[in-house]
Amino acid sequence: MSTYLTILGFNSAIPTVNSSPTAQFLEMEERAFLIDCGEGTQVQLRKAKARFSKINHIFISHLHGDHCFGLPGLIASFRLLGRETPLHVYGPKGIKEMLETIFKITETHKGFEVIYHELESKNSEKIYEDNRVEVYTIPLDHRIYCNGYLFREKPKERHLNMHEIAKYPEIETCDYHNLKLGKDFILSDGYVLKNEILTTEPSKSVSYAFCSDTRYLETILPIIENVDVLYHESTFLHDLKEMADYTGHTTALEAARIARKANVGKLILGHFSNRYHDLNVFTDEAREVFPNSFLPKALEPIKI
Amino acid sequence: MSTYLTILGFNSAIPTVNSSPTAQFLEMEERAFLIDCGEGTQVQLRKAKARFSKINHIFISHLHGDHCFGLPGLIASFRLLGRETPLHVYGPKGIKEMLETIFKITETHKGFEVIYHELESKNSEKIYEDNRVEVYTIPLDHRIYCNGYLFREKPKERHLNMHEIAKYPEIETCDYHNLKLGKDFILSDGYVLKNEILTTEPSKSVSYAFCSDTRYLETILPIIENVDVLYHESTFLHDLKEMADYTGHTTALEAARIARKANVGKLILGHFSNRYHDLNVFTDEAREVFPNSFLPKALEPIKI
């Protein structure tokens, strides 16, 4: 039940023979989330041998083509593969009109429900929650309404210390649940067994922040503070800072500043302009500020 | 100025790691035509090293996703590459609403004009003509309104026989045009020089017919008669004839019958169902009826 991130594509704007537009596959606590869906994402999912059919929630950062043009094809393929499970699609207002217009005109009869969650808020909001995971928006500053997404594992249950528990025959299997939740156990003679004796620390709950297209934006810092892994776009190097501002993007140096100020564990850069051929220039620049900066590797799952 | 066809993708429905949905790049008399545009076509064009920017006319057979989901991304990339030349898009009624809705919501500012030619007729019509090429629709019978397309080089100019012409000093350079058009030359003494003496036969004008998704349909025969190359879908083998009829498709045997009855030069099969792994079964079946049947080879230009 570890959390794995598979980056399916990370280049900006125009797909090329060797690189795909933005899409990521996140497996967290047995849930499978798709983040952004540029053209060709369904083929990238196949190349990554990702559990295609397990995707029940798709999060789209913004409605530029390089982040969403793979959606119609993916959803049409879901239908052809016989999907019946409802699919939740989170994204900016307009995503429903766009997809439903396409499905109407192409006579794509879905055969399963697509549930749209259209976003408009400029404040961070919790948009998904179940018993193990929660997802928040990270409002960004791009040329068009845009959100990043924060994925958080909830605090996990404590581990039973069976060696200690065995010493107290009064503790029965049905008591384990409360122990995992951290509750003390009161023996029949009134003696309180402290939970710390009967259990050990839970596994760490990890978090992942995806920051898609945005200008340098410090208001995201409290939202992404201390995340284990931050993906942050860095379309340009800092010598093109003006171009970055103009087009609504961030430089590698700025992405590293965000990572340092937010005290994240690891920074993955991405969304590089096609003008750069040797991508090591991005980590060279970022590591001056935040040494734990990395280039993405397409299709290779990384443990978070 | 030969005519070359590059098949960019030829599988049906769901794109896979090794095969792409329908798209073809046709170079005829220095024009570059794109026929259908499934998801990922822009990357296939790059892989084929096709003259991307020369495409001024796109012909879409029908509005099922595997034939058109690559259009928004291709057009968005044209813009990013600085295109200014108008782009003509031919396809079923509805194509304009679909694309313009997508462009509006994704804020794709095209920067060049997209001229839509929406088709509704159930009869073959000439939809494109210039001084060298003409294009006709081939009305098909699918689950949704669908046309194939016939591309024809117009009759070419005769070749000058310079050896003979040199014998008559009266013939000047300005007369060559009329000679190429087949006119006789009258010498000043009234003697008529027959054109056949001064010129040789023109190069052959070739033709190509693209028959996308359709049931077996004999009404197309007079339209495609004697074409040099026919691409005809053959989604199934003939033992699944019922399935083919039900889903609006043709079997390999039927495609071969069409080829034979229309007396075409060469048949290329395509749009194979994903259930078949060894595609040679299609040519095995088709060649029983029409020996000059072939499998498509993706990305390899073939001379027509």
Image: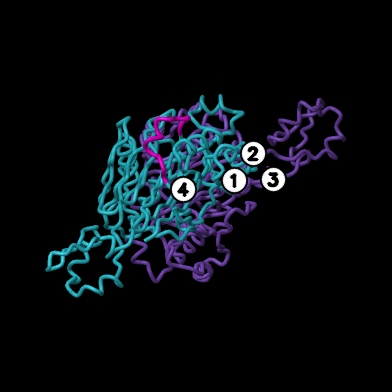
Chain colours: A purple, B cyan
- Mark 2 or mark 3: which is in front? 2
Badge 3 marks a residue whose secondary structure is loop
Tell me the crowding category of disc 4: few under 14, some 14 to 19, or many 20 or more residues within 10 angstroms, Cα based.
many
Please report whichever mark, 3 or 4, sits nearer to the chain's N-terminal start: 4
Asked if residue A221 can be seen in this view, the reply is no
Camera-side residue: A279 or A135? A279
Q: Which residue is mark 4?
A: A39
Please report whichever mark, 4 or 1, sits nearer to the chain's N-terminal start: 4
- Magenta span has A1? no
- Mark 4 or mark 2: which is in front? 4
The image quarter in which residue B32 lies: bottom left
Badge 2 marks a residue whose secondary structure is loop
Q: Do residues under tags 4 and 1 come within 8 Å of each other at their CB atoms?
A: no
Whole-Å distance between the Cαs marked 1 and 2? Answer: 19 Å
The boundaries of the magenta stretch are B214-227
On screen, residue A225 above or below A168? below
- Residue A224 x, y percent position in the rendering: 50, 51
